Image (cartoon, helix red, strand yellow):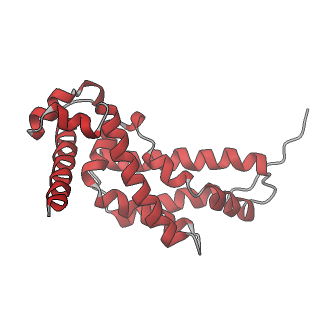
Amino acid sequence: MKNLHLDRRTKYSLQVIRSALFELLETKDLKNITVTDICRLADVNRGTFYKYYDDVPDLFYKIELSIMEEAGETIRQNCLEHFSVEKLIANSLNIIATNRDFTRMLAKNPAETRFLQGIISSFRPQLIETMLANIPDLTEEMSDLYFDFILGGTVNILLQWIKNNMVIPARQMETLSIQFINSVLNTRLCSFTDT
């Protein structure tokens, strides 16, 4: 019974620390939040905080990593066997919508996060294969440039959506994102010659 009590206490401590960070991010930038701020708001002592995290950036990173691992697994289960851009975007938007506290944190600190890039990048091989199949004359070398273009554009569209409190319905964002990606996939390459 003692281990169950410790597990509950650990879960509670991790949750209140995480919630305190999210609440503080409503009014402060990540770089301005201190361990003292979090401990005061979460009503835990510094020893409890340092038992689980090295500092505030480590807390941010571990939250991001756990959601990214969960998101990656969810998308892999839904997309790996029969990959499609539509499934990738739909699953990504669902994960963003179900983790609203985290996505608000993303909007406040977009430069600090690798979350959205990580989700889409985990499907780099499938996206490149899709591009090579759809864009005539695309070389493997150029496919890297196209992938980076799709990644950057999609991530920026999603960050803008999050910053605007997701007022556009997720279904409409899904359509817009897919249209953006498909516009790249439907590109005809110009032939470049040396002059």
Residue pictured at 21% horizontal, 36% vertical: 49
Between 71 and 180, the one nearer to me in the picture: 71
In the drawing, does residue 188 fall left or right of residue 3?
right
Question: Horizontal and vertical percent for residue 155?
Answer: 47, 47
Res. 26 in view: no
State whether residue 151 appears in this view.
yes
Residue positioned 68% across, 57% down in the render: 128
Residue 91 placement, left or right of 40: right
Residue at far right of view: 195
**Residue 170 at x, y percent in the picture:** 35, 63
Q: Nearer the viewer, residue 124 or 193?
A: 124
Q: Nearer the viewer, residue 187 or 8?
A: 8
Looking at the image, which residue is at 61% across and 45% down? 148
- In which quadrant is the N terminus drawn? bottom left
Q: Quadrant of residue 195?
A: top right
Tell me residue 144's x, y (percent). Answer: 69, 46
- Where residue 115 sits in the image (x, y, percent)? 43, 47
